Amino acid sequence: RAGQPGANARLVALIADARQPAIVRATAIESLAGPLPEAAFSDADPAVRSAAAASLGARPATERLAHLPALLADPIRAVRITAARGLADIPDAQLTADQIRLRQRGLAEFIAAQEAMADMPSAQINLAQLQLELGKPQAAATHYRRAIAQDPVSNAARLGLARQLVASRQLDAATRLLDEGIARSSQPGELHFALGLVAGQQKNWKEAAAQLQRAAELMPDDRRIRRNLEAVRRHLLQE
């Protein structure tokens, strides 16, 4: 975590050391920045296999396709679900008929698990993220709105829905959504930051500067805010 030289090699050695408890090896997988050892995907402990599958979630499609299809048939549901989530956005043409069937089973298991906890905002957010991966933005928006209604104090669902609105160029709607959350939020700095970014996309530099300045006051250690505020101030000087 400190970025020290040799850390990756030591983590790989730790992952491969079967004498270590599964939770230790799984944590090492989560911390590893480089490629995983092949043995992690066939480890005897499902916690290690699940961590290995989860580690590929944000990796390029080629890496995911190299390892995750085999885990779709894992005997442990958590591993199957994690593998299916990692392949959710892969086009059918890149999978075999059997892999498509197994992926569908894993996603159905994931959805069933989340629906069993449907009164929890985190479950609604998980479902929203899956629907986005499946290319269904309207369904995702429905789940985000349910999460906001369940927990208006938290920012996660509001920010997720705002990103979706921005992506579809509904900037005014995103602004209203974020602004509505300011008074309720337990961490309004994140919402001010998002409002500043939206105002910047609209080239409303004065509003962007005001929102980013407020975010900087509430989150003084956040470097992203300072970088964006400096950029906005440069635009103001050019006007």
Image (cartoon, rainbow, N blue to C red):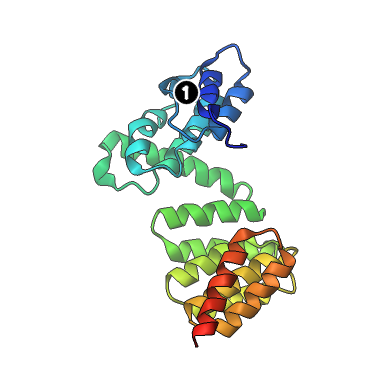
**Count of marks overlaid on the render:** 1
Considering only vertical position in the picture, is 39 above or below 66?
above
The percent position of residue 53, horizontal first and vertical second, equals 47, 33
Q: Name which residue lies at 43% across and 39% down.
A: 84
Q: Name which residue lies at 63% across and 25% down.
A: 23
In this view of the protein, which residue sits in the foreground, 84 or 64?
Answer: 64
Q: Name which residue lies at 54% across and 83% down.
A: 236
The percent position of residue 238, horizontal first and vertical second, equals 49, 84
Determine the image quadrant of residue 209: bottom right
Residue 50 visible in the current orientation: no
The percent position of residue 183, horizontal first and vertical second, equals 74, 74
In this view of the protein, which residue sits in the foreground, 16 or 107?
Answer: 16
User: Amino acid type of disc 1?
Assistant: Ala
Residue 50 placement, left or right of 151? left
Label 1 CA crowd tier, 10 Å (few <14, some 14–19, many 20+): many
Considering only vertical position in the picture, is 114 above or below 193?
above
In this view of the protein, which residue sits in the foreground, 85 or 185?
Answer: 185
The percent position of residue 229, horizontal first and vertical second, equals 59, 71
Determine the image quadrant of residue 153: bottom right
Considering only vertical position in the picture, is 64 above or below 133?
above
Residue 151 placement, left or right of 13? right
Determine the image quadrant of residue 205: bottom right
Residue for badge 1: 40
Circle 1 — which element? helix
Q: Name which residue lies at 69% across and 58% down.
A: 221
Task: Check the image and name the residue furthest to the bottom.
Answer: 239
Task: Check the image and name the residue furthest to the left.
Answer: 93
The quadrant of the image that shows the N terminus is top right
Residue 88 placement, left or right of 178? left
